[in-house]
Amino acid sequence: MTGNKKASTQKKVIIILAAVFLLNLIYTKVRMNSMFSSTAGSDMMSVEGAELPSFDHKGIVYNGATFRDPMAKPLEVEMIEKEEATRKRSTLTKPIAEQEHEDLVLEGVIMGGPEPLAIISGKVVSSGQIVEAAEVLSISPNKVILERDNKKIELTR
C-alpha cells in the first residue's frame, strides 16, 4: 500500500511540475508576443532598410540597433586601427620640409657639462659634429639647429 501511495505522490509531483513548466512557457510566449505585438509605427527601428522591433523594459529601451555584432572586432582593436590609419595619413600629408628631415629625431639635450650635448636619432653629438649628413650648429635646452644641404633644420622636444 505504501508503494502505491508513493507512486501516486510521484505522479502528482510530475504532473504539477509539468503544469508549472507549461504555464511558464505560455507566460513567456504571451509576454514576448506582447512586447513585439505593438511594433507598428513608432516602435519600429529601421537599420539599413531592416525593420527591427523595440520594446521598453523597466525604463530601458531595447532595439536591434543597440546590439553589437558578436563577430565584429573588439572596440579597442577598432580604435587602435583607426589611430594607425590616421597616423599614416598624417605622415603622408606632412609638408615636404618636414619629410626631408624625418630621419632626425631630437631625443634629449644634456646641459651643464663643458659643452651642451644633444641626443639625435640615438647618437650623442655636440656643436660642429655631423649626424645623418646634417651639421649641428647650436644646442639649446629645448631645441637643436642643424644644417643639411644649405637648409637650416630646427629640432624641438
Image: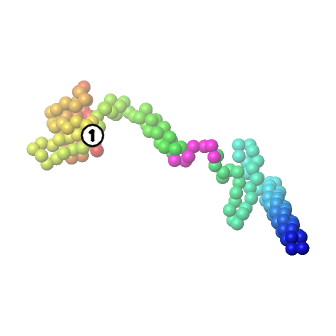
Q: Residue at x 69, y 65 (%)?
A: 59
What stretch of residues is rendered in magenta?
A: 70-76
The residue tagged 1 is: 106
Q: Residue furthest top?
A: 149
Is residue 14 shown left or right of residue 157?
right
Q: Is residue 26 magenta?
A: no
Amino acid on which the number 1 mark rests in the picture: Leu
Could you tell me what secondary structure mostly forms the magenta stretch? loop
* Horizontal and vertical percent position of residue 114: 9, 44
In front: 77, or 51? 77
Q: Is residue 10 visible?
A: yes
In front: 3, or 138? 3
* Horizontal and vertical percent position of residue 39: 80, 55
| Quarter of the image where the N terminus is located | bottom right
Mark 1 packing: few (<14 Cα in 10 Å), some, or many (20+)?
some
* Horizontal and vertical percent position of residue 47: 71, 46
Vertically, is 71 above or below 132?
Answer: below
* Horizontal and vertical percent position of residue 133: 23, 27
Q: Quadrant of residue 11?
A: bottom right
